[in-house]
Amino acid sequence: MPEESLADTKSVWRSPAYPQLHQQEWEHEFFVFNPASGDTHLLNPLSMEILRLLGGNPLTLEQLLERLQLLIDDGEPPLSSMVMHQHLAQLDLMGLIAPATGDHRSA
Amino acid sequence: MIIGQLEQRDLRQRLRSNRLLLQLGPFLLRLGSRDRLFTDTLQLLHPDTPLLEAQETRLIDFHVELQPGQGLRRWWRPQVAFKTDATPPFAPFPRHQGFPLFEWGLNWCIAMQAHQYLMFHAAVLARDGQALIMPAEPGSGKSTLCAALMLRGWQLLSDEFGLYRPESGMIEPIPRPIPLKNESIEVIRAFSPAAVLGPVYEKTRKGDVAHLRPTRESMRLMNQAARPAWVVFPRYRKGAREALHPFARGRTFLKLSGNAFNYRLQGARGFDAVADIVNNTDAYYLEFSDLDRAVEQLDTLTVTSAVSLQL
């Protein structure tokens, strides 16, 4: 794994927006409204689960992967770091998550 | 009192002195004009619109005047300007197009100011207090279908605005003449002998336009709000066979939120309001080519609803 990606796996993320989000789910699609930005987003189930987890505690990518893996059925392929990176980058861009400051790695 | 009960001379006097007070759904309008052609058309197409007397103290929502255009141009190509609060929001129209200018200008006033509502760009009709919302893009046949439904007994709430009040969960009526364009004018004339149409304004910015008068029953029910029951996305397509196709809730949310003029301005109130509508209505897609069959299809919604109420 490249050095840069290794560093990213240690970054801590959180979702300060999560508690304020207005949410609706229809047919396994999630619609969220973020009052802080005034934006409405359409999310897939994985993105929504990431938000839910980061709304509770700040987590590193590794910790997120571990927790999400528990939710995946036995027959399904494991989540890759690459997919997680993409989701985190997208959620960061949307203003729904942000890097956490301070030491939260004990979560 | 309603406009149709005024003597023509009295109506002209009130308009000339800017003291015609009209009740248009939830809005109060003060209107002034010196244009006789406009006055006659107003009387033809708004006969059942209620009037208020000057001494009735109510907050007026919109002050509107239709005034002759200024400058040299008025001598060889007369124009008419729409002014609200003494400001003309857009360029003047040819003099004889005063009535369409008034209707479009009023749409602009509502869209700019009535943010107590979540405003959909949609036709809304109702049966027994249950509202059918038809959001649509230009050219979809929305106004033609709306006109046909009204002429077959549906209550017209609006051809242009779904005025949804989130606190009550109801849509408030603002029945006004329906602007029909191009081929739709003759289609509706042939559809019902009861259709009362105003003059045909040729070559306006939206093509040829004629306005259809709201039914007396729709005007009588002007203060009767309706609860959203169905969302139907219509589209005219030549040769299409009419059928209602269920529309997924997520797609309905996307289309409805994109259709509302002031969705973003409303913030969380708008999101929750659209979600409430989506959760409490059945949504369909309707392609149509024949008005009678399209009306028949939409009538089945009310029958199904009545059956489920009995159960």
Image (tube, coloured by chain):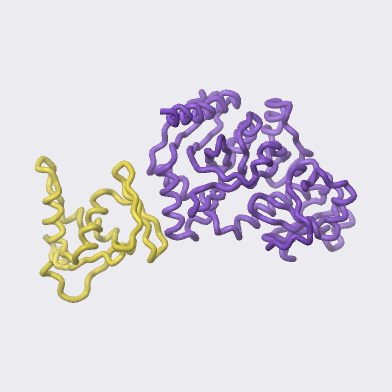
Chain colours: A yellow, B purple
Q: Quadrant of the C terminus of chain B?
A: top left
Q: Position of residue B270 (x, y in %)?
A: 46, 55
Q: Which residue is more in the foreground, B239 or A2?
A: B239
Quadrant in the picture for residue B155: top right
Q: Which residue is more in the foreground, B47 or B34?
A: B47
| Image position of B22 (left or right of A69) | right
Q: Residue furthest front?
A: B310
Q: Position of residue B245 (x, y in %)?
A: 44, 30
Residue at 11% x, 56% y is A66
Q: Position of residue B277 (x, y in %)?
A: 45, 45
Count the marks: 0
Q: Which residue is more in the foreground, B125 or B262?
A: B125
* Residue B161 visible in rendering: yes
A7 in relation to B176, above or below = below
| Image position of A65 (left or right of B56) | left
* Residue B66 visible in rendering: no
B89 in relation to B186, above or below = below
Quadrant in the picture for residue A104: bottom left
Residue at 41% x, 36% y is B247
B157 in relation to B109, above or below = above
B295 in relation to B70, above or below = above
Q: Residue furthest bottom?
A: A102
Q: Position of residue A77 (x, y in %)?
A: 13, 44
Quadrant in the picture for residue B58: bottom right
| Image position of B141 (left or right of B167) | right
